[in-house]
Image (cartoon, grey):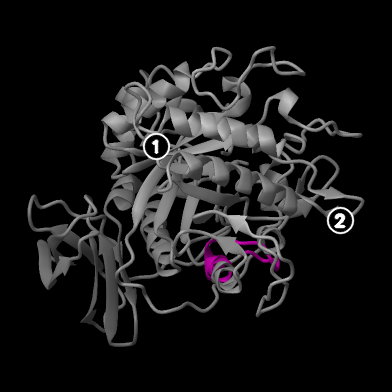
């Protein structure tokens, strides 16, 4: 979630120096690609129903909902007398706003990822020194586990008329001191070990409620940095320490502790386009996701992760600002191309769910976060209008040169379902068919066609209904330096 930390974006973005994309593994043709949206402020607003409807219009089938423990739980330095934190019906809890979000999302066919963040004062440690921008200080594992149990019971599908929630995310960007402090003590990195205990506490609780619940860990910020007011640990370093893995190209197990989770996630913001890698070792932008996947799989093989099956790899936050409305954002035509290509490249690196940051733009210039899938209307989300890149998010399609004589194409149908798709090239006065292909059960389709042309545009079109993707140019535009949040 970017909104609370815009003042720190320049600090983190400064670490996002130019880099080149690394090598990639072969395409995983059977891997699905689910799309999701996160927009905490809008989803908890009085206009949330229209915002959820817009997320669905953009092709999302999942939403990340932020469950602020410090808001739902009782306040104060100590819990009130008689408080039973593991009981979902304890009268000291205030679930009303979150109940509404879950109901509205599920009613529109959106599966919630519930992201537990923050901590009430009584559930934190007491720091000897604390900076103004430091986040929760050592949230107490037992208290967090009790709250997670209460939440999992409340949204188990067996508590009144409340819907079932299956996906449970532990914290937001725990490698960033705004969300978890301290990162270090006397120069020693301590946050990964503390976070591991937090993940294990949540995992034990939500799996005790329903064994088929899934726990999402990670959600890391992409860059590391240290300054007078904020600390961020580089995500690969944080990940290796949390998972008890050594440094180097072939990480090995370094301790006997294990982390219990089912999904690893990341926030691969980038200072350029879809192939841009971070400039510093252990930072992870779009172009570095294969390195993070390699550490994840090495930890699985080493047995430092406890999970009921193969751990999934998700992106739980990502975006670029657009111009307009932000004059320093990515121009509209380029933004649509980058969105489609980013989805492809994340999928190619083994990511099976991608979450876009913001349904709607925030007010400009008061807030410099203009990455919404919809332009902000004057009368709330119901008056918002879709950007060109919204169709690229809904119906991603790319056509990239494979060799001098062949172009590969990849896409996902708007409904993420099997369908017959026509791939076609622009010609004078219309479109000419290049291929007819059947998308698989998750909507993914891929193939190639012969071409020596370096220019022109290609698109995909679903036969039933005729919906078309945004045309994708065969001319590759040069990469450019950007701040993902435009005027940050």
- The C terminus - image quarter: top right
Q: Which mark is residue 53?
A: none
Query: Magenta part of the protein: which range?
Result: 278-293
User: Is disc 2 surrounded by few (<14), some (14 to 19) or many (20+) residues within 10 Å?
Assistant: few
Above or below, comparing residue 15 to residue 207 in the picture: below
Above or below, comparing residue 457 to residue 265 in the picture: below
Q: Which residue is drawn at the image coordinates 44% and 43% (left, top)? A: 167
Q: Secondary structure at mark 2?
A: strand
At which x and y percent is residue 376? 40, 29
User: Farthest residue in the bottom direction?
Assistant: 404
**What residue sits right under mark 2 in the picture?**
188
Is residue 284 rendered magenta in the image? yes
Is residue 124 rendered magenta in the image? no
At which x and y percent is residue 200? 62, 48
Label 2 to label 1: alpha-carbon separation: 37 Å
Q: Secondary structure at mark 1?
A: loop
Q: Is residue 344 visible?
A: yes
Q: Which mark is residue 165?
A: 1
User: Is disc 1 surrounded by few (<14), some (14 to 19) or many (20+) residues within 10 Å?
Assistant: many
Task: Specify the quadrant of the image occupied by residue 430.
Answer: bottom left
Which of 333/351 is in front?
A: 351
The answer to which of marks 2 and 1 sits earlier in the sequence is: 1
Above or below, comparing residue 243 to residue 26 in the picture: above
Residue 330 located left or right of residue 447: right
Q: Is residue 486 visible?
A: no
């Amino acid at each position: 979630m970017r909104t609370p930390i815009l003042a720190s974006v320049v600090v983190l973005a400064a670490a996002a120096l130019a880099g080149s994309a690394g090598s990639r593994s072969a395409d995983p043709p059977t891997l699905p690609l689910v799309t999701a949206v996160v927009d905490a402020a809008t989803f908890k607003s009085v206009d949330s129903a229209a915002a959820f409807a817009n997320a669905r219009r953009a092709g999302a089938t999942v939403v990340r909902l932020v469950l602020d423990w410090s808001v739902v739980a009782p306040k104060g330095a100590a819990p009130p007398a008689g408080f039973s934190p593991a009981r979902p019906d304890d009268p000291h809890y205030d679930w009303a706003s979150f109940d509404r979000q879950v109901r509205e999302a599920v009613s529109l066919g959106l599966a919630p990822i519930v992201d537990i963040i923050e901590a009430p004062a009584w559930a934190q440690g007491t720091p000897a020194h604390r900076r103004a921008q430091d986040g929760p200080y050592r949230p107490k594992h037992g208290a967090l586990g009790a709250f997670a149990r209460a939440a999992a019971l409340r949204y188990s599908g067996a508590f009144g008329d409340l819907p079932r929630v299956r996906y449970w995310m532990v914290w937001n960007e725990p490698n960033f001191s705004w969300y978890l402090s301290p990162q270090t003590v006397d120069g020693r990195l301590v946050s990964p070990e503390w976070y591991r205990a937090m993940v294990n506490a949540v995992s034990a609780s939500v799996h005790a409620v329903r064994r088929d619940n899934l726990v999402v860990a990670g959600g890391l910020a992409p860059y590391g940095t240290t300054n007078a007011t904020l600390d961020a640990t580089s995500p690969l370093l944080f990940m290796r320490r949390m998972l008890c893995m050594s440094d180097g190209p072939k990480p090995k197990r370094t301790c006997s502790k294990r982390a219990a989770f089912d999904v690893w996630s990341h926030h691969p913001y980038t200072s350029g386009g879809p192939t841009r890698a971070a400039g510093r070792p252990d930072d992870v932008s779009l172009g570095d996701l294969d390195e993070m996947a390699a550490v994840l799989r090495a930890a699985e093989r080493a047995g430092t992760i406890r999970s009921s099956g193969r751990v999934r790899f998700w992106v739980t936050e990502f975006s670029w600002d657009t111009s307009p409305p932000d004059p320093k954002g990515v121009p509209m035509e380029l933004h649509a191309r980058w969105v489609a290509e980013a989805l492809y490249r994340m999928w190619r690196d083994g990511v099976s769910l991608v979450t876009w940051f913001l349904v709607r733009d925030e007010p400009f210039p008061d807030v410099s976060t203009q990455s919404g899938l919809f332009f902000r209307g004057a009368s709330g989300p119901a008056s918002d209008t879709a950007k060109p890149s919204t169709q690229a998010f809904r119906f991603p399609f790319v056509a990239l040169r494979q060799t001098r004589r062949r172009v590969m194409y990849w896409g996902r149908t708007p409904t993420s379902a099997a369908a017959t798709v026509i791939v076609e090239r622009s010609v004078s006065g219309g479109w000419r068919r290049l291929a007819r292909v059947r998308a698989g059960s998750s909507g993914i389709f891929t193939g190639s066609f012969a071409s020596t042309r370096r220019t022109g545009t290609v698109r995909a079109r679903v036969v039933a209904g005729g919906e078309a993707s945004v045309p994708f140019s065969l001319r590759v535009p040069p990469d450019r330096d950007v701040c993902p949040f435009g005027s940050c």
